Structures are given as C-alpha cells and as structure tokens.
Image (cartoon, helix red, strand yellow):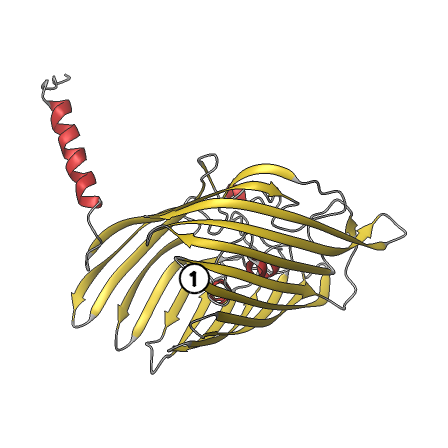
C-alpha cells in the first residue's frame, strides 16, 4: 500500500535542500567536510595536442577546458581524534569544463584515452596524521614526481601551456601518470624546513609495483627538492595517460624568490626500459627554466624547456603527435588576479618537435606550431 505525500512535503524538502546548501557554502572549518574545486576554460588558436605537434598538424580555433589548471571538483574532510591525531580523506574528480563531460581531455585518444578516467581518478584516499609522527595515506594519490614538477615551474600544473608538465608527462615517454592507484604514502613532519615522502603503489598482479622517494626543503625565499621514482605497474583499467613501459625517473628542482622576480630551475632524467617482451634502454634528458615577475595584481610568466635523447628510438608515423627524439617548448604570458579565487590569463606558446618517422627510408622530421589562448580560472 502506497502512502500519500503531504502537500507540504515538496516545500519541506526544498527547505532542507536550501539549508544544506547554505551549510556547504560556509567557510571551511577545522573539522568536517568541504566541497572544493576549480573551473578553467581557455579560448584561442592551438597547434597539435598536449603531446606535441607533428608533420601534418594544423592550427585550429578551440574552446578548451584546463588552460592553466585541469578542471576538477572534490570532497575533503578531517576529524580530530585527540592527542594531536587527525583522520582525513579526499575524493577528487576531473571534468571537461568545455563540454561538461567527465575525464580530463579529448586531446589524447585511445589507447591512452584520458577521457576514460575513472570518476575519482584525481584522488581517492583516507589517512591519519600527527604533528609528531607525520601522515600516512592509502588510496589513489597524486604522484611525487607530479608534486615536484608543478612546484618547480612558473606555470604550475598547466598541461596546456606549461613547458615542464608537458615535457615530463606527455608524449608517451614517462610511465605512471600523475596519480598512483593502490598506494601507501608516508609524509614525515617538517623539521627546519626539511621533509620527506615515501610512496609505494602495490601491483595487484598488474606487472610490478611503483616506488617513489621525495626529499624537499623550503624556508624563506628558497625551495628545493629531489625525487626519484620507479614504475613497473601496468594498469588494466586506469587511463593514466602514459606508456605501459617500465620507466625510472628523477628530478632535481630549485626556486628562489627575489621579490622582483621568482626564478625556477629544473633538471631531470627519464629512462624507458620497455617491457619484458620488448625491452628498451632509452634515456631522455629534461630541463626547464622559468620565471614569474609580479606586475600590479598579476604576474608576467616565461618558461623554456627541452626533452631530448641521444639514443636510437623506434620510428613512428609522421602523423604521430609528440617528439620522440626532441621536444622544445617556449611559453610567454600574463596571469592577472581579479580576486583571491579568480584570475584571467593570456598565453603564447611555441612548440617544436623532432621525430624519427616511418615509412622507410627512416628520417627525422622537424615540426613546429604556435598556440595562443586567453582564459578564466575560478577556484571554489
């Protein structure tokens, strides 16, 4: 037998919804759950994809999501357990703010296919922390190499214009992606500006596991860090945006804020070992210099980076995006803060690649393209 709803029920439900929305809109408390996120859209003329230009790339007018930061939203919260111990969690998902679809981007198709990201692919973890003992987290956690990369360049986490993120995480050279599933991560407390992190991603019968160690120092105007990682995991269902090959990588970065300009420097190396069936031994050098100059309510940004190899790499079709021999990126721009949470920006990027191409007789083809975009980024 079905009961009848009171005519006042819809009004009561609406009132409860408005109350809940009002509570969520309050500033974050020291304890509880917070909704947070970022929406970033850019419009302009773009050459190639995030993996680089190829011999037949054509410039196209586009409105894209994630010009300076990949759009995302999430939930996070914490609970005080007493005696300085705190329980915390984070659940975070990517979305394409140009179309409203889930996932990071349409720019990289199958088999990488970052459009097929699982729902909480950006982060999904729970942990315990203490000022005395540090923090332990378990779940899907942002990789330490990505943490170092986005903190060691003037363009932050921009996967559209940032030379260092593009050279390190796109083009099918590095394994592991920007987040590691099935991870256990330990962060030490900070002692006099120094800290360390150890991360392990369990294989769960998907090849081998991933391991990483990061050591950092930051105090006053100086910041520096060193990170090393080994990737042997071969996920079957997680579109992590990288090669399935085993790789190792390290990065050394430093930044210094002179007040009139903040400068960043980075050197690194990626070793592609291939797979058990097709072993490789190809090393890539990566370096990047960038700077941010405060101007009024914004910053002038400049960055130049190079990824190259002297080893022999297998030829690929000339239509393949990316530079498996060399890629150079120069980006200039301005980022203007309208408020603490909203900024507008204009970026100009020159992307150049050298690719060992098919068909025979094999040759090395140079390609280049210029992209320009203006965008809006809002944090909530």
The image position of residue 52, as x and y in percent, is 66, 51
Q: Is residue 155 visible?
A: no
Residue at screen point 78% across, 47% down: 318
Q: Nearer the viewer, residue 109 or 49?
A: 49
Q: Is residue 45 left or right of residue 147?
A: right
Q: Quadrant of residue 128?
A: bottom left
Identify whether 291 is placed above or below 112.
Answer: below
- Assign the N terminus to one quadrant of the image: top left
The image position of residue 109, as x and y in percent, is 61, 42
What is the number of callouts on the image?
A: 1
Residue at screen point 48% across, 65% down: 293
Q: Residues within 10 Å of mark 1 (few under 14, many from 20)?
A: many
Q: Secondary structure at mark 1?
A: strand
Q: Is residue 354 left or right of residue 266?
A: right
* Residue placed under numbered mark 1 in the picture: 183
Farthest residue toward the front?
296
Farthest residue toward the right?
361
Q: Nearer the viewer, residue 184 or 178?
A: 178
Q: Is residue 67 left or right of residue 191?
A: right
Identify whether 159 is placed above or below 17.
Answer: below
Residue at screen point 60% across, 49% down: 50
The image position of residue 324, as x and y in percent, is 72, 57
Q: Nearer the viewer, residue 292 or 68?
A: 292
Q: Is residue 200 visible?
A: yes
The image position of residue 199, as x and y in percent, is 44, 68
Q: Quadrant of residue 102?
A: top left
Residue at screen point 48% across, 45% down: 375
């Amino acid at each position: 037998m079905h009961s009848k709803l009171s005519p006042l029920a819809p009004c009561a439900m609406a009132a409860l919804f408005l109350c809940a929305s009002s509570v969520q809109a309050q500033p974050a408390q020291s304890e509880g759950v917070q909704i947070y996120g970022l929406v970033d859209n850019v419009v302009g003329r773009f050459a190639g994809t995030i993996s680089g230009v190829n011999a037949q790339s054509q410039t196209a007018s586009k409105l894209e999501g994630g010009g300076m930061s990949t759009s995302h939203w999430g939930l996070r919260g914490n609970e005080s357990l007493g005696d300085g111990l705190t329980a915390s969690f984070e659940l975070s998902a990517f979305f394409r703010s140009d179309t409203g679809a889930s996932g990071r981007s349409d720019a990289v198709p199958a088999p990488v296919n970052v459009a097929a990201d699982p729902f909480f692919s950006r982060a999904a973890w729970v942990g315990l922390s203490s000022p005395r003992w540090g923090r332990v987290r378990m779940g899907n956690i942002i990789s330490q190499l990505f943490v170092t990369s986005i903190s060691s360049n003037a363009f932050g986490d921009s996967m559209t214009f940032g030379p260092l993120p593009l050279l390190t995480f796109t083009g099918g050279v590095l394994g592991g992606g920007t987040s590691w599933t099935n991870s256990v991560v330990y962060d030490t407390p900070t002692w006099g500006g120094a800290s360390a992190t150890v991360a392990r991603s369990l294989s769960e019968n998907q090849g081998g596991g991933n391991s990483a160690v990061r050591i950092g120092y930051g105090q006053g105007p100086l910041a520096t860090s060193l990170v090393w990682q080994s990737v042997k995991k071969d996920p079957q269902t997680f579109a992590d945006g990288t090669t399935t090959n085993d790789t190792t990588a390290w990065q050394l970065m430093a930044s210094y804020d002179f007040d009139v300009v903040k400068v960043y420097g980075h050197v690194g190396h990626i070793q592609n070992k291939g797979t058990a069936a097709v072993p490789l031994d190809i090393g890539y050098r990566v370096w990047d210099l960038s700077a941010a100059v405060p101007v009024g309510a914004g910053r002038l940004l400049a960055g130049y980076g190079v990824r190259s190899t002297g080893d022999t790499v297998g030829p690929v079709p000339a239509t393949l995006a990316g530079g498996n021999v060399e890629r150079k990126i120069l980006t200039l721009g301005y980022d203007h803060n309208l408020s603490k949470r909203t900024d507008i920006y204009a970026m100009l990027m020159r992307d150049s690649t050298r690719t060992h191409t098919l068909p025979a007789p094999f040759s090395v083809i140079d390609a280049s393209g210029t992209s320009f975009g203006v965008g809006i980024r809002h944090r909530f």
